[in-house]
Amino acid sequence: MIKRGLREEEFKEFLSLSPQLAYDPFLLTDMREAVDLITKTIDEGGKIVIYGDYDVDGVTSVALMVRALRTLDANVDYYIPSRISEGYGLNKEAIKNLKDEGYALLVSVDCGVVSLEETKYAHSIGLNTIITDHHNPGDEIAEGIIINPKLIGDEYPFKGLAGVGVAYKFICALKTVKTIPRKTIVDLLELVALGTIADLMPLIDENRTIVKYGLNLMRKSSNLGISKLIEVSGVKKDKLNAMDISFKIAPRINAAGRINDASIGVKLLLTEDEDIALKLANRLNEINNERREFQDFAHNQCMEKAKYEIKNGDFLFIEAENCHEGILGIVAGHIKDKLKRPAVIVQKIDEENEGKKIYKGTGRSTGNVNLYEMLNENSDLVLKFGGHSMACGFTIEEENIKELKNRLNMDLKAMLEKDETLLSNEIPVDLDIDSKDVSLELAHDLKYLEPCGKGNPEPIFRLNNAELKSFRMVGNSGEHAIFDADNIRCVYFNFDRDIYENILSKNAKSAYDIIGHIDINEWNDSENVQLRVLKLIES
């Protein structure tokens, strides 16, 4: 806990099963004005539209707002733009259509803080707006009422809320003037926890309170849609943790926004009908399987190109062909993880700019390479771009692709000449440990540190000079490894055959340092301690 920056007086709250840390929602800038406007709209019977993003944070934000406002008999519905045809955030065409449909108030969730032109347009045609967001504001911010803890001068003590966390604080503030049932306020924590974990928000401070209560509710099946999604995902409900959300639950909701229709996720999270919930959960499962197929196709194509590109420079700039646009960000992430280099993938889209072909790009970074700054330095070559240090999205004319590729490689080369550790991905070890100390009791005690994730990573241990025995490959295509080290069971997911080929030799008896997490393996109603390996280093 000390290594994670906690003071001794914070230990009790950090470990508590019933944390109490939470802040007054009215500390957020413009919260009073937002509550007044939405109250006036509800009282007058005005139509309200919740405008969200197509990822899990956006979907949970939309479901939360709609569920809460419907307890007030508000005239409320929602709108989520298409990732492919509309892209992220507010757009004028959607705003016009919503105004034409009679909406009096647009409430954005998980988007909108930089939508200056769009909010100006909305106001010019008589559509009021409340922007709730958690993304960094740019030089120009939206017009009107904005609730965002990251606004300059905002006094909210915690800046790490997800979009759904900001939406939840809005509902908590609204509860001070409107009769929203306490049970609703409590039950909504499931949605807040789901979106917070999925959006990789820091699991510290107020988020820790939110996620602990939310996970506990999910284990008890409060939200019917989440319960059915857990069921079809094959997760043990009573043991549900943040990792299950990240790797089993969230991808199924995200898949709909990537390759289909994000509103399926909203419908699932709103339904009170068990049959409909099961049907929608199964549909998300099917879409996720389709997403995997698209992803495998794109991964195989782009990885081959990346292995060629790495011969020419450390910035991997890849042109994809006939891949599904919605999964290219995931593929870029896998490539940067595998090759330890920043990766950008571009692909032609069905748009033109003054007769010129347009490509859409998505990128993921690694080490200490700030992808946003690199793009910003070369913004003269792109039509528009956005993102943050580790991820980006942009559009570019075909004729500028080669120049951007060259510049990014040259820029990274110059940066590496100044700092050769820039691409370093060293694993931060918390503690060296002896094999005799690796026990089931310790594995259970470490659970008090959960939920783990960004801002509160799982503890990482190093077992030194261990001899590997009973080494075998498992999985559908032999992609994982299981072995024993000093009588401790070890599992290594996505084992790299190329790097560790000598270990596979029957004669390999070298000692290794093992870096990984102390974990619990459950099998046939029994528990055993295991090491979930992150890295092997020959001693």
Image (cartoon, grey):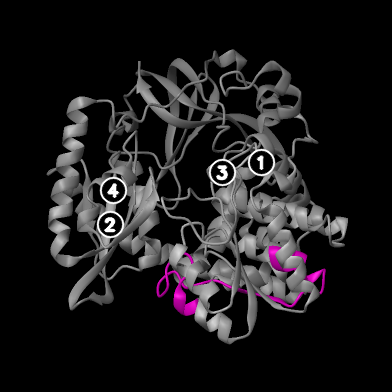
Q: Does 336 sit above or below residue 187?
A: above
Q: Does 441 sit above or below residue 295?
A: above
Q: Residues within 10 Å of mark 2 (few under 14, many from 20)?
A: many
What residue is shown with label 2?
Answer: 345
Decide which of 391, 434 is in the foreground and name it. Answer: 391
Give how far across and how far down residue 30 sits, in percent: 65, 53
> Of helix, strand and loop, which one carries label 1?
helix
Q: Which residues are magenta?
A: 65-94
Q: Which mark is residue 201?
A: 3
Q: Nearer the viewer, mark 2 or mark 3?
A: 3
* Disc with the residue nearer the chain's start (4 vs 2): 2
* Disc 1 to disc 3: CB gap under 8 Å: yes
* Disc 4 to disc 3: CB gap under 8 Å: no
* Disc with the residue nearer the chain's start (4 vs 1): 1
User: Residue, x 65% and y 21% (percent of image)?
Assistant: 439
Q: Does 465 sit above or below residue 124?
A: above
* Disc 2 to disc 3: CB gap under 8 Å: no
Q: Does 177 sit above or below residue 493?
A: below
Give how far across and how far down residue 263 sits, in percent: 58, 72
> Of helix, strand and loop, which one carries label 2?
strand
Decide which of 38, 539 is in the foreground and name it. Answer: 38
What residue is shown with label 1?
Answer: 207
Circle 4: residue type: Asn
Q: Nearer the viewer, mark 4 or mark 3?
A: 4
Question: Could one spot residue 121 in this view of the protein?
Answer: yes
Instruction: Identify the image quadrant of residue 294.
Output: bottom left
> Of helix, strand and loop, which one carries label 4?
helix
Q: Residues within 10 Å of mark 1 (few under 14, many from 20)?
A: many
Residue 406 on the magenta span? no
What residue is shown with label 4?
Answer: 376
Give how far across and how far down residue 37 sits, in percent: 71, 65
